[in-house]
Structures are given as structure tokens and as C-alpha cells.
Image: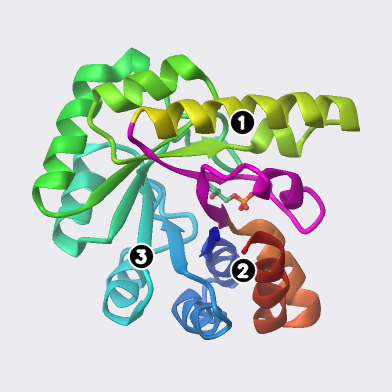
Amino acid sequence: MARLAVNVDHVANIRQARGIDIPDPVTAAALVELAGAHGIVVHLREDRRHIQDRDLRLLRETVKTKLNLEMAATPEIIGIAKEVRPDVVTLVPEKREELTTEGGLDVKGNIDALEAAVGELQAVGIRVSAFVDPDLVQIKASIDVGADIVELHTGTYAEAKDEETGLIEAEKIAKAAIFASKGGLRVSAGHGLDYRNVELITEIEEIEEFSIGYSIVARAVMVGITQAVMEMLTLVT
Ligand code: PXP
């Protein structure tokens, strides 16, 4: 049975649009957990466009399931992670001008820096996940840098224009998941997954956890966050 980790960045996006203190991603995280989700995910971006340092610190104190911090492997954010100690860190690429994380991390091209970052985080008891495209070269590199988990980027699958392309992308994700699992990594998946496209990916047994944000928060605006989480749980677990 797979787990569902819910990304609450978009609750903070709505808050930041007004620059006041509602809606609160920390309150949302509590409701998400009460609805049965297995983890909370936030991305502390270098530009602090949505989640703020205070949110992360409060979440560390309040999250009862598992806190996963998405972050770029920069000295500043690594320092914060070592201090706050989320259960898991997911290393992602970060570009200031992007709307959301575009593409997976180039682990192969940054072996030395990432090996050092992984070691530093693991030394304080944090498990490290690498967010990579479903590309065997990047997965092999993730093993080489000592990552515990790979999160497979499902964005290309989610954006497929027709069923045939979707099936081809799903097949790539399945092959990548099997390769990663055989290589000793735990496997997660996420990005762009929604209530319509997630089911095909749930058929891939190696994927233990789904990290989903936007579609759940968007549905929550219409039906409430408890129902939105519960509906997704019935699809992924
Ligand atoms: N996983 C990672 C590494 C991400 O960067 C994101 C986006 O913040 C997600 C999962 C969730 O993507 P979405 O919001 O499209 O569900």
C-alpha cells in the first residue's frame, strides 16, 4: 500500500498573495494529517516565495506524521535543514524564475557537491531523497551519492497530450522505479499528479509514496481540504 504525502506550499502561496497571515499552511497541515495523509511536504525556496522559515519551524514542532523538506542543496538551506531536522530532505533543482520545480536534479553532473550535501544531512539523522527524472543515469548517480530515496519526476507523464504518450511516459517511470528499487533505493513519485492521472502510476508497485500538492489544494478550494485529501487517499492507497 502506497502512502500519500501532501505538499502545502500552495496554501502559503494564497497567504503570500495578500501578505497577511491567512490561510495558514501549518493549520492546513494539521487538517491534512487528520484526514489521513501520511506526510507533509514543504519547499523552502531561496526566494521564500511561499513557505517561510517560521512555517518550517512550526511544522517541525507540530507535524505528527513525517515532514519532508524540499530544498536546493545550497549552504544556507542545508544549514537550516540541519538545524530544523525534517524527517526527510528532498533535493530539488531551483531556478528563481520558474513557476514550479522544472525537471529533475542533475545528480550525474554534480556528483561531488551532492555527495557532500547528502553526507552532511545524513550525519544529523535526516534521510535524503533526490528528485530526478525517470532516467537510469540519474538514478545510478543517486545511488552513487548515497541517497536513501529517489523521487521520480512525473511531470512529463502528467503533461502528456494524449493517451499513447502518457503510456510511454508511465512505462519510463515503471522501468526507473524497478531499477531504483533493485539498486537499494526507496522510491517515491510526484509532480503534476491529479485525481485523473494518478491511478496508472499507482500500479507501479515499487513506488511507496506519492508527493502531491497542487491538485489537492485546488480541489480543497472547492470541496474542503479534508474531502480533497480523503479522495486522493482512496486513489493512491
Ligand atoms: N515533488 C516535488 C519534488 C516537487 O517539487 C513538487 C512541487 O512542489 C511536487 C512533488 C508536487 O507537485 P504538484 O504540486 O504538481 O503536485
Instruction: From the image, state whether disc 3 or disc 2 is nearer to you.
Output: 3
Q: Is residue 109 magenta?
A: no
In this orientation, which residue lies closer to the viewer: 150 or 55? 150
Q: Is mark 3 within 8 Å of ligand 1?
A: no
Circle 1 sits in a helix, a strand or a loop, which is it?
Answer: helix
Give the quarter of the figure containing the N terminus: bottom right
**10 Å neighbourhood of mark 2: few (<14), some, or many (≥20)?**
some
With respect to residue 1, does 208 lie above or below? Answer: above
Which residue is disc 3 drawn over? 67
Which residue sits at x=14%, y=60%?
83
Question: Hey, what amino acid is under mark 3?
Answer: Leu
Left or right: where does residue 221 sit relative to residue 189? right
Which residue sits at x=25%, y=49%?
127
Give the CA distance from mark 3 to mark 2. Answer: 21 Å
In the rendering, at what x and y percent does residue 5 appear? 51, 62
With respect to residue 40, does 204 lie above or below? Answer: above
Question: Hey, what amino acid is under mark 1?
Answer: Ile
Which of the 4 quarters of the picture holds residue 187?
Answer: top left
Which residue sits at x=20%, y=63%?
84
Boundaries of the magenta span:
184-211
| Residue 222: image tag | none
Give the CA distance from mark 3 to mark 1. Answer: 25 Å
Give the quarter of the figure containing the C terminus: bottom right
Which residue sits at x=16%, y=49%?
79
Circle 2 sits in a helix, a strand or a loop, which is it?
Answer: helix
Which residue is disc 2 drawn over? 14
Which residue is disc 1 drawn over? 173
